Amino acid sequence: MLTETIETGIDHRGKKTKAQAEGKYLFHPVVDFICLGGGSLALFVLLAIFIPLEAATPAASVITLGLANLINHPHFAHSYQIFYQNYWQKISHQHPSNGLRVRYIFAGLVVPMALGVFFATCVQMNDAVMLSYGANIMLFFVGWHYVKQGYGMLIVDSVLKRKFFSDSEKKVFLGNAYSSWIFFWLLTNWTISEQNIWGLKSLTFSIPIWSLYVSGSIAIVSMALTFTMLGHKYFIRKCPLPINGLIAYFTSVYIWLALRLHPFFLFFVPVFHSLQYLIVVWRYQYNKTHSTDLSPQQTHEPQMEDALSPNLWKFVAFIAMGLVLGYVGFWGAPQFFDATIPYDHTVFGGTMFMFIFWIFINIHHYFIDNVIWRRENPDTKRFLFGSS
């Protein structure tokens, strides 16, 4: 995600203001805490203590389905809105960064075409088995994206609070995130032979037991290194830590452990992942719609404004469009195609396009996010951090 730093602000007398000394927030201390991970942590604890898990799954599926339409699906749509806005300008030779332009082309054109060819080949060959492996591939990218986003939230919060981590410390965080997810993914494939997603069986890969021991050992060592590094930083070097960011990181990396207690917790993982994402995207977009009115020092200070402000309505329109596109991408379009385009229902069931759309969006989302939130992306530096 993001690793850029912000210069510490100085007031007109040459002294740090209170807000500058304490750092800044995306919106508000409480809002940041809840959305970045504190809310999910509190809810998981309450659910585990007070609600019988065997009775909770049916209710959770209904509740989270509603939340998905309001939170999870718009978060995917917002990434498309940001990524493809002025897309041809981003991939033109006028773009200052050749490397970033190549990433925009790969994520915006090559990846969706490759996915389209894969799905078309599966349908043309009437190969439901090949198509089903797409769900497992999606699971890998989704989990990789989740833990990387947790790392990104940590870095964002550390930048806003001026509580920075060194390059070596960042590598420890990343190594722990990646090794932990690889272990969880291998464990899932080893434990579950198949699952049903939109009428199609999602097949898992055959995992040798030795790979679990190796990946689990690496994950444990990386976890120990992470906590040792944090303990040394806080207790020995007396460096303050970005608490909200650390909560976001650890809940994202280790939330998968809750699934070992009961699959019920899986219903809530996408919701809180999306909350993490939305608070950053909405701050980014709010700053962007107000970019002509706000100075870099104001980009993290929520401003009081007239309800009829054109900039405010642009921001509201962005959110509303995300709701609409989220519904179209996950429900409207696939349901329309399932009802109107013929295919072999005896092989693929009755919701093949629903399966394809959900898998496509989840995988593609990983690649476009990997471009939007890169440190060298000038839009991110300007509209999220207020730096040029």
Image (spheres, helix red, strand yellow):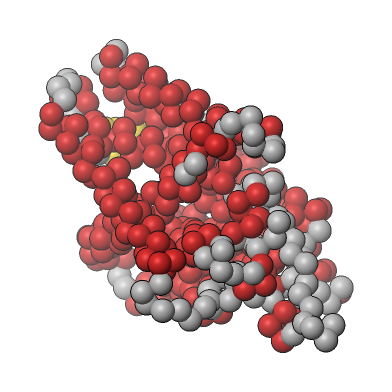
- When the figure is inspected, residue 319 is found, relative to residue 192, above or below; the finding is below
The answer to whether residue 59 of the structure is visible from this angle is yes
Of 321 and 96, the residue lying toward us? 96
Report whether 131 appears left or right of 17. Answer: left
Q: Quadrant of residue 313?
A: bottom left
Q: Residue at x 38, y 49 (%)?
A: 77
| The residue positioned farthest toward the right in the image shown | 237
Count of labels shown?
0
Q: What is the x, y in percent for residue 152? A: 62, 56
Q: What is the x, y in percent for residue 15? A: 82, 84
Q: Residue at x 39, y 57 (%)?
A: 318
Q: Residue at x 14, y 22 (%)?
A: 342
**Which image quadrant: the C terminus?**
bottom right
Q: Residue at x 43, y 44 (%)?
A: 80
Q: What is the x, y in percent for residue 145? A: 53, 46
Q: Quadrant of residue 21?
A: bottom right
Report whether 295 appears left or right of 56. Answer: right
Of 381 and 95, the residue lying toward us? 95
- When the figure is inspected, residue 304 is found, relative to residue 316, above or below; the finding is below
